[in-house]
Image: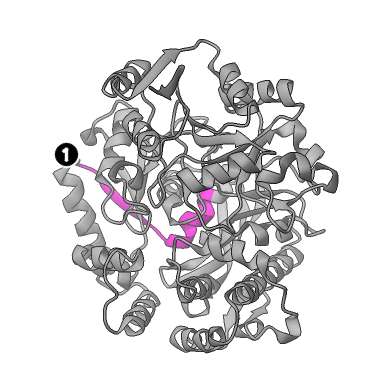
Amino acid sequence: MYILGIWDGHDCGTALIETNEKNIEIKAAANEERFTKRKLEVGFPEKSIDFCLKSANTKPSEIQQIAITTTDFAKTLTRLFPSAKESYYRFRRKKIEKPRLVDLRRNFKYRVTEIKEKPLCRSLSKWYFKKNLEKMGFKDFKLYIVEHHLAHATGAAYCSGFDKALVITIDGVGDGLSGTVNVFNNGEIERLSEILAKDSIGIFFEQVTNLLGMRELEDEGKVMALSNYAYGVSDEKNKLLNLFEVDGLRIKSNMNTASRYKFLKRILWNTPREEFSFMAQRTLEKKVVKLFENAIKETGIGDVCWSGGVASNIKANMLIKNLPSLKRWFVFPHMGDGGLALGAALELSYQLNGYKKVDFNHVFFGPNYSEEAILEALKKEENNLKFERIEDIAGHAADVIAKDNYILWYQDKMEYGPRALGNRSILAPAHSLKAKNELNMKIKQRNWFQPFCPSLLEEEAEKFFVDIKGFDKYMTMGYSTKPEATDRIRAVINVDNSSRPQMLGKENLLYRKLMENVKKITGDGIVLNTSFNLHGFPIVNTPEDAIEVMLKNKAPYLIMDKFFVEFK
């Protein structure tokens, strides 16, 4: 049985799973931004639906079970009036001139998103999806609605590999909630508590992001990175800590969303932005860690799964990971709303077929392109580029990197989720500040305070980092660097001596071979790994996308499949 999961909001996308007698196989999953080239795309994800069906060699008419998610009032309203969704997308990403009454507009949005589902919401949402799916050729299908935070929780629980676990979700808002605490036990998810939208610590961090002149729902990671450059503010002097309290299994706010925004604005007026970032990050860390401590203590369960947009905060994740009461730890790799489609599909599979194990040991569920398609794309740029086919391409890439160069690296299936994990990556030596600075100035054009991250062989992890609790394949957690290792990996550690590594096992053999060759040459099986994209754009999808990045930024080396590409 095929089940299609669809999400049409922020970072919209699709996932297709197949349920058989023994387990669940993820056939394909991708987000619409990779096809439209609009970062964190919103709307009905027609292109990613088309990709998923083609990947499984199936037709719309053959799909009979479809899971959709989130039917709160605000989401339903934007389905009825897509222009409102597009307008807010452009406003949020600052693609328009600053409009009048900005604060009023933003506070209205927060108030509307706090409204839970109304009686007509489900019917209107189903009508919207039915209309769009029938245009694509779907027929005789049944639509199922999966609640927002249940989709987050199911994605994390089913993909963790745990039979029993504590499952916590925290994000901005969805279906009137900003978080949940749950127990997962052999397929059953029992909800223990809910955190209301008005108490959202995710919205709080969005507000901080916006007040610092950044883009909410997109630049929260920059706030986290900037916080490392503050001199530090004691908890006694941190005026943001009292905005929230943790009461058992709930986080509660002592202000409504609009009042909190005004309060934050007043505090920022005479607070350096680095200190303001630090205060916000510290507030998030203390409240979220306390919630986890309480949940582990109350349930007695030390295996923990975690999802929702706040789960992308790797500094908070590092503190949670190091809790003495925590045993095993899994962060869903596509933790934000972009992962809802897969979570919804998995939840529907449980409802229809009972509990099945998920075959989940990598996230390479996106498009791939044949050697012929890559060669055809290269031939279109023969006037600008020269290229040759090299059989041992991993060995050749390692040689180039070891000579203090960075390379654009494009292979096989695209990753699902926000992280480049070795198939759509830009790679450089982990020790080289020269290569790091060139990469930042010429390609990534990132803020100076944002660190780069490493990929390394999992067996090398304890050589560089402390407090290893299992191997993190997906760049979802922070680790402190061993003092004796810092000089060897200075291009991939933050100013606070932390790092967010991808610990590579055998899930990507070509990428592993590259790092094994790097180890032979340098002595360390580690490289700088950042996402392969133009500044402000999604990770590249097609061969043409990859070539466009090389040409626009004059990157010296591109490796696609077995082709080594240089400028003429």
Q: Is residue 79 left or right of residue 392?
A: left
Is 149 a magenta residue?
A: yes
Q: Where is residue 81 in the image (x, y as percent from the top left)?
A: 19, 67
**What segment carries the magenta color?**
139-155
Quarter in which the N terminus is drawn: top left
Q: In this view, does 529 lie to the left or right of 492?
A: left
Q: Position of residue 500 (x, y in %)?
A: 65, 48
The residue under the point 73% across, 48% down is 328
Q: In this view, does 325 lie to the left or right of 100?
A: right
Quarter in which the C terminus is drawn: top left
Q: Quadrant of residue 558?
A: top left
The residue under the point 74% across, 81% down is 235
Q: How many labels does the image show?
A: 1
**Taking 34 as reference, is 337 above or below it?**
below
Q: In this view, does 241 lie to the left or right of 13?
A: right
Q: Position of residue 345 (x, y in %)?
A: 41, 46
Kind of residue indicated by mark 1: Gly
At mark 1, the secondary structure is: loop
Q: In which quarter of the image is residue 136?
A: top left
**Taking 51 as reference, is 261 above or below it?**
below
Q: Where is residue 220 in the image (x, y as percent from the top left)?
A: 52, 64
Considering every residue shown, the one lying at the far left of the view is 135
Q: Local crowd at mark 1 within 10 Å, few (<14), some, or many (≥20)?
A: few
> Which of 502/211 is in front?
211
Q: Is residue 17 visible?
A: no
